[in-house]
Image: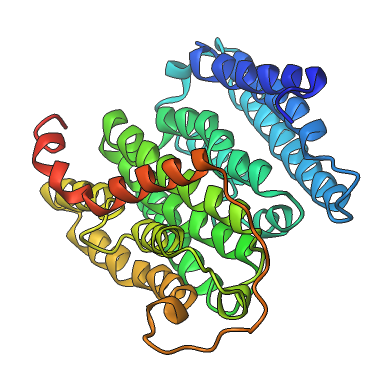
Amino acid sequence: MLNHPTRLLFYLTLMTGTLISISSTSWLGAWIGLEINLLSFIPLMSNMNNQFATEATLKYFLTQALASAILLFGVVTLSLGSHLTFSSFTDSTLLNTVLSSTLLLKMGAAPFHFWFPGVMEGLDWFNGLILMTWQKIAPLMLISYVITPNAFSFSIIIICIITGSVGGFNQTSLRKIMAYSSINHLGWMLSSVLLGESYWLTYFTFYVFLSTSVILLFHAYQLSHINQFFSLPLNNPILKMALFCNLLSLGGLPPFLGFLPKWIIIQSLVDHHYTPLVTLMVIFTLGTLYFYLRMGYSAFMLAHAETKWIPLMPFSPSLQWITLLLLSFSLVGLLIAPLLIPIL
């Protein structure tokens, strides 16, 4: 509830912690911002009406506290008395690996993703959206300071994409499917971090837009499991088309909008002679498109089973207009590609 003063205060401090981290000139200031962000998100996760919220909150707190402790220990121990600035550690391979691992743990990137699907399962859709989008801004910005094109970073990118693709195959919970999809997209973001700041900011912007559109429709339809796509008659054809077109766009299927950032990253990686990496990324990303197609399979069938009872799900006019706007952006996504690619 955004109109609740206490929750509004925590949202403000949540954004403040992220801004402190990305604007800090030292690792100590970045660590302080991450701690403010963590302590602001913990109260927002708690929900008395959800029995899994307490478990998810505890998992998130323990994991983030562990990552913060390792981050602070690594910075203080390996600094060897030098100033805690970002430029002090650019030549240390060991420190880069330690700091990158802790930031990857904070983001939930594979192979440090053990907590991410479980925490997503216990959250509502709005807090899950914050966890998938806003909570990744500060770690991504910090990891862009230390990541270098080496075997460690390439391995993390491939593991993220493989885990995100394979992990969603046997899932029936939409929250866990979105979590593994986020891990897959995180692999693409890490690869774009190697190219430059403008690339990962562009990809992250598209990812936030598409994730928001999909989760808005999940919340509107009150969907939580994949079998609800088959048993629930989505009797509004416009909203139904918007839901599954946005799902396919998030999966990166051309000619939808979600293919545009992948197209930009693929072209740029090929130009930087990372062709083997691009080949593996494209091959394993097809797995995410598979489970998105599986969710929308019944909707695209000409004849499919529907229940005889139709639940009453009123939709406000504002939601319908927002849905139409999101649908139009997804459908005409590649038409704006010639305008964006020269800018990058």
- Residue at x 68% of width, y 23% of height: 11
Q: Residue 16 at x, y = what percent?
A: 62, 15
Quadrant assignment, res 254: bottom left
Q: Is residue 198 left or right of residue 75?
A: left
In the rendered image of this protein, does residue 239 appear above or below residue 126?
A: below
Q: Is residue 142 left or right of residue 282?
A: right
Q: Is residue 152 left or right of residue 286?
A: right
In the rendered image of this protein, does residue 274 appear above or below residue 12?
A: below
Quadrant assignment, res 115: bottom right
Closest to the observer, 188 or 73: 188
- Residue at x 73% of width, y 50% of height: 123
The quadrant the N terminus occupies is: top right
Q: Residue 302 at x, y = what percent?
A: 36, 86
Q: Residue 338 at x, y = what percent?
A: 8, 41
Closest to the observer, 147 or 115: 115
- How is the protein colored in the picture? rainbow
Q: Residue 316 at x, y = what percent?
A: 57, 43
Q: Is residue 112 visible?
A: no
- Residue at x 28% of width, y 64% of height: 253
Closest to the observer, 276 or 60: 60
Q: Is residue 107 left or right of residue 114?
A: left
Counting the numbered discs, the total is 0
- Residue at x 30% of width, y 72% of height: 283
The quadrant the C terminus occupies is: top left
Q: Is residue 344 visible?
A: yes
In the rendered image of this protein, does residue 129 appear above or below residue 283?
A: above
